[in-house]
Image (tube, rainbow, N blue to C red):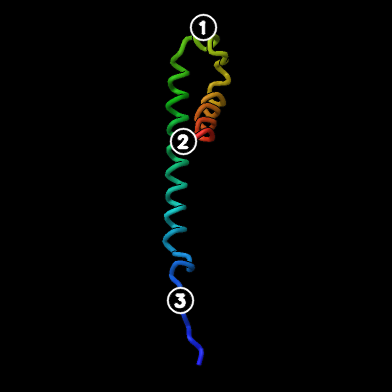
Amino acid sequence: MAFFSTNTASQPSPGKGLLRSISGAFTRGMKHIQVAQMTSTLNQMSDETLETIGVERSEIIQYAEKLVFEADATN
């Protein structure tokens, strides 16, 4: 006689994938908000201040993305 045993710990939960997807989407959304806020702040700076921190006005978006995404990679 064969016994059928299920080990619930080894079976993937369908809800976990959904939660990971939601969590990932939320995290990406927050990163985009942070980039937008950083871009806005940098755009409000004078050209002299931007020059002091080594950023040209045409590079603001790329610089904001670098700050936000590199900060995430170090945590």
Q: In 3D space, how far apart are the residues under numbered discs 2 and 1 (Cα atoms)?
A: 27 Å
Task: Please tell me which residue is depicted at 48% across the width and 65% down the height of the picture.
Answer: 12
Q: Secondary structure at mark 1?
A: helix
Label annotation for residue 6: 3
Q: Secondary structure at mark 2?
A: helix
Amino acid marked by disc 3: Thr
* Residue that badge 2 annotates: 31
Mark 1 sits on what residue? Answer: 48
Image coords of residue 33 (percent x, y): 43, 33
Residue type of the residue flagged with mark 2: Lys
Mark in the foreground, 3 or 1: 3
Residue found at x 48% / y 83%? 4
Q: Residue at x 48, y 68 (%)?
A: 11
Q: Between marks 2 and 3, how big is the CA–CA gap?
A: 40 Å
18 with respect to 57 (left or right): left
Farthest residue to the bottom: give it: 1
Q: Secondary structure at mark 3?
A: loop
Q: Residue 59 appears at what percent x and percent y?
A: 58, 21
Is 32 on the left-hand or right-hand side of 59? left
> What residue sits 47% from the left and 18% below the top?
43
Residue 59, disc: none
Q: Position of residue 30 (x, y in %)?
A: 43, 37
Furthest residue toward top: 48
